Image (cartoon, rainbow, N blue to C red):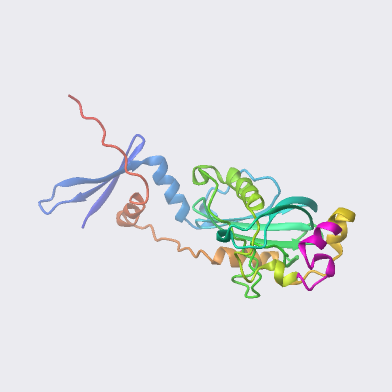
Amino acid sequence: MEERLEIAGETVALYRRRADGSWILNRRGALVDFLRELASVLPGRLRDQTLLLPPGTRVVRTAGPNTAFVVETAPQVRRLRWGSSRMGDGGPYREVRLAFPYVIVLLLFFREEFEEMRLYYRTGPLEALTDPLLRPNLLNVQGDTDLMASCRACVRGRPAGLDYSPIAEQVPRLLEYFWETGFNADVEDNAFVRSQSLDPRIATVEAWEATSAADPLFILRLPWAPAGLALREAIDRLVALRPHQVHRLGDAAALADLLYRIPEARPEPRDA
């Protein structure tokens, strides 16, 4: 079927040729939406990579429609809601104050929509992409040693209206949402259980909280387990979870496919 695209003003329209040779309008969309979709499937080097970086961002990696952020937070004592039951069991939560080392969070977005979060520790700030990462000791984070699942943060639901916000706003909202969600035993093979045998000071949440109050920086001196990969490899693995294909955009049919991914524009009013 022969197709053609026409751009007029702020609209792009797809026409298809009928059997009698005439053309019929098939679909219409806003030019700005069409160009945004087009940019998302082009090779990374051709994309506009100007981004407003969220607070604490150390690295940004773009690969086709994928964007990965690496956010680092300095050692601090956090106030968390902590429970030992599963979320659906209705078990109580209590407030705890726990010391944390450098926390490295990787967030993956696909076409500006949140996909995945990984959480790691370090005892010093990031200085290079070859810096090794450490396993955390948190509930709500997978403790599986398999690199594809290890250190995956469980983010239940999404903040309201998240998908309609720029990425620079989504990242801090997601991090706030993660830390404010109650930590519980929903993830059976969680990183907290996996790390209890590393040191008596983090063997229980009570011991962790008591030592945090007495010496918050003790957390930087613990023998944390290696995550088994450096920062660059962690980013590469995260981006690989959402593989993308660079589309061949050599004809009208390929461009027409993009038009079906965006909202359809309303028909233009006809003259009376």
In this rendering, position of residue 24 left or right of residue 87: left
| x 69%, y 67%: residue | 191
Q: Is residue 15 left or right of residue 89?
A: left
* Vertical placement of residue 168 versus 121, above or below: above
Secondary structure predominantly adopted by residues drawn in magenta: helix
Q: Name the outermost residue toward the bottom.
A: 146
272 versus 97 height, above or below = above
Quadrant that contains the C terminus: top left
Image quadrant assignment for residue 88: bottom right
Residue 115 location, x and y as percent? 53, 57
Instruction: Identify the image quadrant of the N terminus.
Output: bottom left
* Residue under the point 26% across and 49% down: 4
Q: Give the quadrant of residue 240.
A: bottom right
Q: Is residue 102 left or right of residue 15?
A: right
Can residue 227 be seen here? The reply is no
The picture places residue 246, in percent across and down from the top left corner, at 45, 61
x then y, percent, for residue 10: 36, 36
Relative vertical location of residue 177 with respect to residue 233 in this rendering, above or below = above
Viewer-proximal residue among 179 and 36: 179
For residue 268: magenta?
no
The residue that appears at 63% across and 52% down in the rendered structure is: 181
Q: Position of residue 35 (x, y in %)?
A: 42, 45
Q: Residue at x 83, y 61 (%)?
A: 219
Pick the front one: 159 or 18: 159
Asked if residue 244 can be seen in this view, the reply is: yes
Residue 209 in the figure: left or right of residue 157: right
Q: Nearer the viewer, residue 104 or 131?
A: 104
Q: Residue furthest top?
A: 272
Q: Which residues are magenta?
A: 196-211
Image-quadrant location for residue 268:
top left
Question: How many numbered marks does the figure carry?
Answer: 0
Residue 204 on the magenta span:
yes
